[in-house]
Image: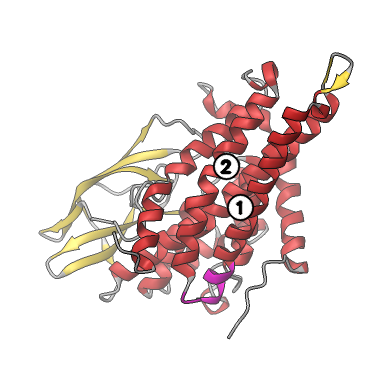
C-alpha cells in the first residue's frame, strides 16, 4: 500500500524557482492588468519561454512521445506559480486538458507537437463542465462537424482543437485545425480576461478522428486532471493573497500602530492562514494521487475543487478588504486575483457540484 508524500521534492523546488523567476521577470502585475485595456500586452513570448525554453508543455507526456516524462506533481507546481502570477498563458488548456485527452485517446503524433510547445491545443469543452457531466454538442454529419460549444478556454489562441463529437456509435474525439474552413472561435467577454474564453462554432468543418472507442474515457480523464491541477492554481493564488496581505498589515499604520497588531485583523488572518494551509494539503493530495494513478484520484480531485475554489475567493476578498482603499484601486493587482479566483470557482463545476459528485463517488445516499 503506497503512502502519499505531500512534501515538495528537490526537483519540484528547483522547478518552482525557474518558473517563478521567469514570471517575475516577464509577467508583472502591471502588464497583466493591461489585459483589460483596449490594446493588451502580448504574452505569447512568455508562453513560448514556459513551453519551449523550460520544456513545461510536455511535463505530462512520456519521454517516448517527446515529452519530459514527469507527472501531475510537477505540473501542479507550475500551476501554483501561474496562480501566484495570474499569468495569462494557456498551460491549463493546452498542456493539461488537450494533452491528457489525446494521451488517453491513444494519440501518438499530435501530442508530441503539443509537448514540444510549438503547437498549442485546446479541448473544446465548456470550462464550467464538471467531470462526469459532459454532454457533446457537436455532431458528425456527412463526414463534417456541426455544432456550437460555448465558453471554451484557450480556443482563440490554439493551433489545433480537440473536439468531442457525437458520432453514429457514440462519443468520438476529433482533431480540427483552428484555422480551417468551417471553424469560428468568437471571444466572449468574461470576468477574468487573463484566461480568455471563446464560443466555438463548427459549420461543416473537416476533422481527423484520433480515438479508438476511448473518447468518453479521454474526456473524463482530462476534466478530472484539470480539476485536480486547477486546485494547485487556486492554492498559489490564495498563498499570494495571504502573503501580500500579511506583509501589508505589518507595515500599514493607523493611530500610531501597525494595523496588523489589531486583534480583529489578527483573527481574520489567522483564520485565512488555516484555510490556505488546509488548501495546500488538499491540492497536494489531489496532485499526488493523480501522479500515482491512485484509485482515489477522482475523489481527491473533487474534494480539492470543492474546498480550494472557495478558499481562493475568500483569500482574494480578504486581500482587497484588508488593503482598504488601495485594494480597491485599478492600479493595485488585488482585483486581478479576485477575478481569477471567481472564474476558477466556476471552472469544472461549482463547489456544490463537486460535493454532489463526491457523494456519488463514495456511495452516500441522496
- Horizontally, residue 361 falls left or right of residue 6, namely left
- Which region shows up in magenta? 288-295
Characterize the local packing of mark 2: few (<14), some (14-19) or many (20 or more) Cα atoms within 10 angstroms.
many
Residue 2 shows in the view: yes
Quadrant hosting residue 165: bottom left
Most frequent secondary structure within the magenta stretch = helix
Q: Is residue 260 magenta?
A: no
Q: Residue at x 58, y 86 (%)?
A: 1
Q: Which residue is mark 2?
A: 312
Question: Are the two marked residues, 2 and 1, in contact with CB atoms closer than 8 angstroms?
Answer: yes
Percent position (x, y) of residue 71? 58, 70
Report helix, strand or loop for mark 2. helix
Q: Is residue 159 left or right of residue 132?
A: right
The residue closer to the viewer here, 8 or 21, is 8
Going by the picture, which residue comes out furthest to the top? Answer: 255
Q: Can residue 31 be seen from the camera position used here?
A: no
Which residue reaches farthest bottom?
1
User: Residue placed farthest to the right in the image?
Assistant: 256
At x 49%, y 33%, the residue is 193
Q: Name above or below for residue 18 compared with residue 32.
A: below
Residue labelled with disc 1: 279
Secondary structure found at label 1: helix
Task: Identify the mark nearer the N-term, 2 or 1.
Answer: 1
Which disc is residue 237 wearing? none
Amino acid at each position: 500500500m503506497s503512502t502519499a508524500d505531500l512534501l515538495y521534492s528537490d526537483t519540484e523546488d528547483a522547478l518552482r524557482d525557474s518558473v517563478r523567476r521567469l514570471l517575475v521577470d516577464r509577467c508583472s502585475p502591471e502588464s497583466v492588468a493591461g489585459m483589460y485595456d483596449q490594446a493588451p500586452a502580448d504574452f505569447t513570448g512568455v508562453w513560448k519561454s514556459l513551453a519551449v525554453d523550460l520544456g513545461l508543455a510536455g511535463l505530462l507526456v512520456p519521454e517516448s512521445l517527446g515529452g519530459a516524462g514527469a507527472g501531475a506533481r510537477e505540473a501542479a507546481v507550475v500551476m501554483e506559480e501561474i496562480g501566484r502570477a495570474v499569468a495569462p498563458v494557456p498551460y491549463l488548456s493546452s498542456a493539461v486538458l488537450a494533452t491528457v485527452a489525446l494521451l488517453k485517446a491513444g494519440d501518438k503524433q499530435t501530442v508530441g507537437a503539443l509537448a514540444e510547445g510549438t503547437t498549442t491545443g485546446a479541448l473544446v469543452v465548456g470550462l464550467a463542465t464538471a467531470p462526469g457531466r459532459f454532454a457533446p454538442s457537436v455532431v458528425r454529419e456527412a463526414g463534417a462537424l456541426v455544432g456550437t460549444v460555448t465558453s471554451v478556454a484557450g480556443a482563440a489562441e490554439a493551433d489545433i482543437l480537440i473536439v468531442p463529437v457525437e458520432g453514429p456509435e457514440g462519443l468520438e474525439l476529433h482533431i480540427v485545425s483552428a484555422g480551417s474552413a468551417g471553424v469560428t472561435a468568437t471571444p466572449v467577454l468574461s470576468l477574468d480576461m487573463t484566461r480568455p474564453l471563446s464560443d466555438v462554432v463548427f459549420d461543416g468543418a473537416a476533422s481527423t478522428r484520433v480515438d479508438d472507442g476511448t473518447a468518453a474515457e479521454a474526456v473524463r480523464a482530462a476534466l478530472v486532471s484539470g480539476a485536480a491541477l486547477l486546485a494547485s492554481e487556486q492554492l498559489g493564488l490564495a498563498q499570494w493573497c495571504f502573503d501580500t496581505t500579511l506583509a501589508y498589515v505589518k507595515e500599514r499604520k493607523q493611530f500610531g500602530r501597525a494595523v496588523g497588531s489589531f486583534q480583529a485583523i489578527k483573527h481574520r488572518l489567522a483564520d485565512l492562514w488555516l484555510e490556505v494551509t488546509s488548501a495546500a494539503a488538499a491540492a497536494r493530495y489531489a496532485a499526488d494521487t493523480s501522479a500515482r494513478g491512485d484509485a482515489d484520484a477522482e475523489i481527491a480531485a473533487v474534494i480539492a475543487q470543492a474546498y480550494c475554489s472557495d478558499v481562493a475567493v475568500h483569500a482574494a476578498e480578504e486581500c482587497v478588504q484588508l488593503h482598504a482603499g488601495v485594494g480597491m484601486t485599478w492600479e493595485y493587482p488585488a482585483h486581478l486575483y479576485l477575478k481569477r479566483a471567481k472564474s476558477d470557482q466556476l471552472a469544472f463545476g461549482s463547489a456544490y457540484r463537486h460535493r454532489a459528485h463526491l457523494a456519488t463517488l463514495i456511495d452516500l445516499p441522496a
